Image: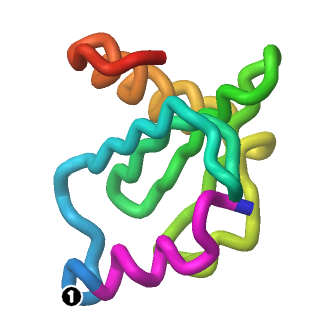
């Protein structure tokens, strides 16, 4: 579902079994061999990815605490959470001089 199937596990292991208290932001504006351009935020146990390879603005979201393998996309089920995380992601992007 998401950029790397082991990302949730890797992040949890990196932080000693717990996710960091501060939000983590990622920005990949260019497509690679494996994925299109995207930006993401990890906040608490939520990970949101905003895909830029289509005009509709597709999102993927998972709960890393309950689904560290990122197998279940919860974006359609939790639109309020998607909006909250996306608002924070956009605020972070606007504050950086990165291409979009």
Question: Where does the image place residue 39, in percent across and percent down from the top left?
Answer: 49, 36
Q: Residue beneath label 1, please?
A: 16
Whether residue 43 sits left or right of residue 61 in the image: it is: left
Q: Please, is residue 72 above or below residue 35 in the view?
A: below
* Quadrant housing residue 18: bottom left
Say few, some or many: other residues with alpha carbon within 10 Å of mark 1 (under 14 / 14 to 19 / 20 or more).
few
Residue at position x 57%, y 43% in the image: 49
Q: Nearer the viewer, residue 75 or 56?
A: 56
- Up-down relation of residue 85 to residue 40 (above or below): above
- Type of colouring: rainbow
Residue 74: image location, x then y, percent = 72, 53
Front in this rendered view, residue 54 or 46: 54
Q: In this figure, what is the number of numbered marks?
A: 1
Residue 3 highlighted magenta (yes or no): yes
Write the residue at 26% across / 47% down.
23
Residue 55 location (% of width, % of height):
80, 15
Q: Secondary structure at mark 1?
A: loop
In this picture, which residue range is highlighted in magenta? 2-13
- Which residue is found at the position 41% from the left and 62% from the top? 45
- Which residue is pictured at 47% across the width and 55% down the height? 46
Residue 98 lies in quadrant: top left
Q: Quadrant of the N terminus?
A: bottom right
Q: Is residue 92 left or right of residue 66?
A: left
Locate residue 53, reporting x and y percent: 74, 29
Q: Quadrant of residue 69?
A: bottom right
Relative to residue 94, is residue 81 drawn left or right? right
């Amino acid at each position: 579902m998401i950029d790397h199937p082991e990302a949730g596990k890797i992040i949890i292991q990196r932080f000693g079994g717990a996710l960091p208290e501060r939000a983590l932001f990622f920005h990949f504006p260019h497509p690679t061999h494996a994925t299109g351009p995207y930006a993401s935020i990890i906040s608490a146990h939520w990970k949101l990815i905003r895909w830029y390879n289509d005009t509709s603005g597709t999102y993927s979201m998972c709960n890393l605490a309950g689904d560290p393998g990122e197998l279940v996309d919860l974006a359609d089920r939790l639109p309020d959470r998607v909006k909250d995380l996306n608002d924070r992601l956009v605020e972070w992007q606007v504050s950086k001089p990165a291409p979009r």
